[in-house]
Image: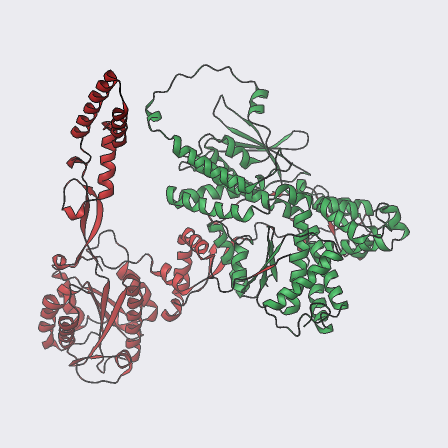
Amino acid sequence: MVMHIVDRRLNPGSKSLENRQRFLRRAKALVQGAVKKSSQDRDIKDVLEGGEVTIPLDGMDEPRFRREGGTRDMVLPGNKKFVEGDWLQRPNQSGGKGSGAGEGDSEDAFRFVLSREEFVDLFLDDLELPDLAKRKLAETESEGLQRAGYATSGSPANISISRTVSRALARRVALRRPRKDEIEALEAELAECDDDTRRRELLTLLEALKAKAKRIPFIDPIDIRYRRFETVPKPVAQAVMFCLMDVSGSMSEHMKDLAKRFYMLLYVFLKRRYKHVEIVFIRHTDRAEEVDEDTFFHGPASGGTLVSSALVAMNDIVRTRFRPADWNIYAAQASDGDNMTSDSGLTGLLLTDKILPVCQFFAYLEVGEAANYTFDMPDSSLWTLYERLRNDGAPLSMRKVSERGEIFPVFQDLFKRRTTSQERV
Amino acid sequence: MGSSGGRLFEGADWDFQTLQRVHDACEKIARTELGLDVYPNQIEVITAEQMLDAYSSVGMPLFYKHWSFGKQFAFQEASYRKGLMGLAYEIVINSSPCISYLMEENTATMQTLVIAHAAFGHNHFFKNNYLFKQWTDADGILDYLEFAKGYISACEDRHGRETVERTIDAAHALMSHGVDRYPGKKTLDLRAEEKRAGERRQHEEAVFNDLWRTVPNTKHKSKATLTVERRRALLGLPQENILYFLEKTAPRLAPWQRELIRIVRHIAQYFYPQGQTKVMNEGTATYVHYRIMNRLHQQGRITDGNFLEFLQSHTNVVFQPEFDDRRYSGFNPYALGFAMMQDIERIVKNPEDEDRDWFPDIAGKGDVEGVLREIWSNYRDESFINQFLSPALIRRFRMFHLHDDPAESQGIKVDAIHDERGYRRVRRELARQYDVGFVDANIEVMDVDLDGDRRLMLRHTTVKGAQLNETDTRRVLQHLADLWSYDVALTEVDGTDKVLKEYVVSPRAAAVAA
């Protein structure tokens, strides 16, 4: 007999991926709760690693008719000392049969492993990017065309032939337009007919048909349909994220670490929303420079603090490389709050006139030392400045952070889905 | 390497030629010595990950999508990763051709074992056992699953995933009560089934005429009230196949929902024999692989080393922990089945006086393979044990029967042990453990209140005082009510028709059948 061997190893794996996704979708609320809970006591890096979660089985159960209680009879192997008529103690109150039991209620919690993507998805799911339309820039946004049904008018290039022909056909059928072969059949009969009365009959019939065919056109202008198009705004699918950080001597490693965590989260978040995300690192002391990631976080630097220098640098980069019409611009600034008093005016001006109008979102994160004293101290000069700007209506988001554990709540708070998106903080 | 006599393979490595040689060698022994009659074989090599995938679609190569399979997968994956669970060496599907999945990481010896076990043992059982012949359609199953998968996903496109999922959830909850337990008037032909579904749909589309909607309803003729008997006869009551009843008579289900129920019902029916023949099926396959492997070793086609490797796996497979062992979780169907097959071989070949008394028909008959083939064809677990569990085996397993009556304060009673007085009782009780009539709750649709509120009335006849678990029952009834769209009542009665408990469940507002 013929036997076939099939090598299935190269078939695409994860056939059950879709089932898994269905399961996760169904258990979403539960899994999300579990994810939140497990992310509380993890580092950011680990939080985005995925891992095991446990959810209660509520709502995920598959009930069956099953019976319990009653008299039970069982046959077991391995009798060593019992003889007929012996009485055995029940193992416990429930009268279970020892090792054989264990159906049903034992399964009240459900553990399983989530992949990194699933974890991040669920973690960031109820967060939302500030849905600020690109103010002032809306008109320059690019537009695309989309099919939208049919119209009775339009350019000849857009005639939908199939639609037109089918309408014409329907009309011809409805009005009983004589068909060509009908006429031809009559003509053929006429040609062969010798009987005069019959010939006359045929002639009148033929004429009537031909007249009718003439009256009812093959294609009438009312049949014609045009493909209709609508213009739809095409969303900008790329984003750039500016990381601004004060690296002057007053910024400790701890503060930089906090800032880094915040940037990472923001990056992961943007990455999920946009196809293409670029990052620009700008560090500043009393002058600003664009650097690579490593230098940004670890490179030594010293000097005074001029926030305006970073804003100038950012503005230049935006102007030269990231046309606001083509890019969604996000900026996050981290600082310990020090700034030269004389710089405040310039900083405020730059921010309100140049930076904020082109940004989708601007967050200021004031990082403090681990010991919680930042909050007892009077507000820093930068915080005071920004607060004043915000009160004047500038769309700024600002938070203070001094502990690692606060990064997540702060991040979630910043991007929480809101019903009305004007008020933040 | 010669086709006969030479070694089939050396060491642990194998390739497709090895598999072919192994298959051919096994086939020769299976056909000539054991007289097996099998479906054509198709052997598919898969990875561990694919095996895990297969687990979560009840072992079938294709299946419709549903979240519950994802749940199962997530669960199994977690326990596999933790090392709590090993994977099976093989999965075999009752189809023609008979598909066996082989794991790629098995050694050559293991592949030989698996081919002998699945591609010949199980395969023969599937093709010849009366239950499988009666209830499954090996030729049509894969096509039918393909159809089911396509149909369900088409339904999802048309009616929305959630609606479809709700219907399937409900049907799954009733799956254990969606099988025919007694043969009906015709055997199942899944191919025709698939064609019929397509034709029904086409017919609906062809005769669709929106005008009918606008025709004013004619006045109903006053109909004579049906007598109870007549009504029950019309509805085919009492009916124990609840899914069948719903499919045919639920008043407000859409046609596609009936089709979904039908699909779930057919699949439940397809798996129905497997649950009734675990011991026999595994016993047959284990016995067959044991015979084939031994013969291959005798012929010198596998080395002593390979044979020892085989013996080790074989011993693990047929290991039966005793009741007080931590590893004990009921009888191991491989162990019990294999032991019984070997015992029958002994009885046929070298019976003792006791065996002659107990099994006059087969004792000393000589034709081991003929007797076994006859048994494999005509029995299921319950009847097999009831008929062929010998006193010798009861002694060997030291079986004993416990009777646990909650009303009895003294404890659990040892009712019978492996002695002259106990053999028959032990055997009867063990057989009963495998009786589907006892394993599933006996629930029947009794009546529908057609004149009143269309309440569906079910009855559970309890056996030995075991009642339904209340939480689960309410949930299942909720699903049932959603499909039925009116109230559903379940009454639990004991053997004397005394009512023990009553449930009434109303359909949810956002019911399945809208």
Q: Which chain is green?
A: B
Q: Is residue B185 left or right of residue B347?
A: left
How many numbered marks appear? 0
Q: Is residue B477 left or right of residue B443?
A: left
Residue B83: % across, % down: 57, 66
Residue A280: % across, % down: 22, 74
Vertical position of residue B160 compared to residue A349: above or below = above
* Residue drawn at x 73%, y 51% as measured from the top left: A89
Report if residue B320 is visible in the image.
no
* Residue drawn at x 66%, y 33% as measured from the top left: B494
Which quadrant of the rendered structure holds the N terminus of chain B? Answer: bottom right
**In the rendered view, how is the structure colored?**
by chain
Q: Quadrant location of residue B491? A: top right
Residue B375: % across, % down: 75, 47
* Residue drawn at x 61%, y 55% as measured from the top left: B92
Question: Which colour represents chain A?
Answer: red
Residue A274: % across, % down: 27, 63
Task: Determine the residue located farthest toward the front in the rendered image.
Answer: A194
Report if residue B414 is visible in the image.
yes
Q: Quadrant location of residue A424? A: bottom left
Q: Nearer the viewer, residue B18 or B271?
A: B18
Q: Nearer the viewer, residue B428 or B45?
A: B45
